[in-house]
Image (cartoon, grey):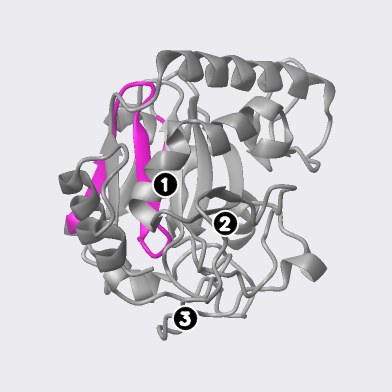
């Protein structure tokens, strides 16, 4: 669906101004949309998995660990395929108001793609470089949106998501290094063409919902506090968007229709998109491992 088609449907949760702002800038952050009980449950589950990670020595299908991970000091950078880790994560993604927010941004027929829970630990080693999401999991159109929920208060000094307003209407950049290897980040020469004066931090208290269009250039700085920053992220698209490469981290729910009906016709956007590696053959670690490899 196109933005005009989507906006023609009455909103379920967001205001029309919030929806229009999203299509204009490529992102938004909003407070007060998620029931307190859901927020408490997500925080409790996050804490439980951090505790469980003490018994796991190396990254696996569930956990992406940082280099300092150990039983005494867990360093979980990502809980992968979130909706497969506990039924309540899928309940939140498919049955809560969260899926209605997705419908306000992608149209009444909503397809689920993927999910993860990212942690930004204190220190300079937790920077995420500028990137776009869609080059890792290209679709036939650019409706996919990443919806996130902050599980703690996130002020500017805690490394919030930072987005460049209007960049979703610009080029889709190659996310490979000069040797052609996947880097998970935009090359410096291409970033020189992006107006970083238009970058905005997505801050807010625990429970803040953030939305980032798949083409929006975004990053996050180091966490300069003494507290970890967890954010649960869920990707949705219009039902008429179809992935044309394997998902980096597929879930058992990938492709499920969570609102409305399956599409009978694919929407094909003519804007070209670079081809990522075939993750089903090459495997996928995370954006952290890709960007660490480039730095290394």
The residue labelled by disc 2 is 291
| 146 up-or-down from 3: above or below | above
Of residue 20 and residue 42, the one placed in the foreground of this image is 20
Residue 76 placed where, x, y %? 65, 31
Q: Quadrant of residue 171?
A: bottom left
Q: Secondary structure at mark 1?
A: helix
State the separation of the CA atoms marked 2 and 1. Answer: 29 Å
- Badge number at residue 268: 3
Q: Is residue 105 visible?
A: yes
Q: Residue at x 49, y 79 (%)?
A: 273
The residue labelled by disc 1 is 102
Q: Secondary structure at mark 2?
A: helix
Q: Earlier in the sequence, mark 1 or mark 3?
A: 1
Q: Is residue 82 magenta?
A: no
Mark nearest the camera among 2 and 1 is 1
Q: Along the horizontal axis of the image, is 20 left or right of 75?
A: left
Residue 45 placed where, x, y %? 63, 19
Q: Quadrant of residue 193?
A: bottom left
Q: Residue at x 47, y 41 (%)?
A: 99
Q: Are marks 1 and 3 in contact (CB under 8 Å)?
A: no
Q: Earlier in the sequence, mark 3 or mark 2?
A: 3
Q: Secondary structure at mark 3?
A: loop
Of residue 259 and residue 244, the one placed in the foreground of this image is 259
Q: Which region shows up in magenta?
A: 198-223
Q: Residue at x 60, y 69 (%)?
A: 243
State the separation of the CA atoms marked 3 and 2. Answer: 30 Å
State the separation of the CA atoms marked 1 and 3. Answer: 20 Å
Q: Is residue 208 magenta?
A: yes
């Amino acid at each position: 669906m196109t933005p005009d088609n989507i906006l023609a449907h009455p909103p379920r949760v967001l205001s029309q101004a919030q929806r229009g702002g999203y299509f204009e800038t490529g992102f938004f952050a909003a407070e007060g949309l998620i029931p307190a009980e859901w927020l408490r449950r997500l925080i409790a589950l996050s804490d439980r998995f951090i505790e469980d990670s003490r018994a796991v020595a190396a990254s696996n299908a569930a956990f992406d660990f940082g280099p300092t991970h150990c039983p005494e000091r867990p360093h979980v950078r990502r809980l992968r395929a979130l909706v497969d880790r506990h039924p309540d994560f899928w309940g939140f993604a498919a049955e809560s108001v969260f899926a209605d927010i997705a419908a306000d941004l992608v149209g009444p027929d909503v397809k689920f793609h993927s999910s993860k829970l990212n942690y930004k630990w204190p220190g300079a080693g937790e920077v995420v470089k500028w990137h776009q999401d869609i080059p890792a999991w290209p679709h036939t159109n650019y409706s996919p949106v990443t919806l996130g929920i902050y599980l703690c208060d996130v002020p500017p000094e805690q490394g919030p998501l930072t987005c460049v307003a209007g960049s979703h209407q610009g080029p889709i950049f190659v996310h490979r290094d000069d040797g052609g290897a996947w880097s998970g980040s935009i090359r410096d020469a291409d970033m020189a063409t992006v107006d970083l004066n238009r970058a905005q931090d997505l801050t807010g208290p625990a429970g803040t919902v953030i939305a980032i269009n798949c083409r929006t250039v975004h990053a996050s700085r180091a966490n300069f506090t003494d507290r970890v920053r967890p954010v649960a992220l869920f990707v949705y698209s219009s039902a008429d968007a179809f992935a044309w490469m394997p998902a980096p981290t597929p879930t058992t729910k990938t492709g499920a229709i969570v609102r409305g009906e399956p599409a009978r016709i694919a929407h094909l956007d003519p804007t070209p998109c670079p081809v990522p590696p075939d993750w089903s053959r090459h495997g996928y670690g995370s954006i952290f491992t890709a960007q660490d490899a480039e730095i290394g």
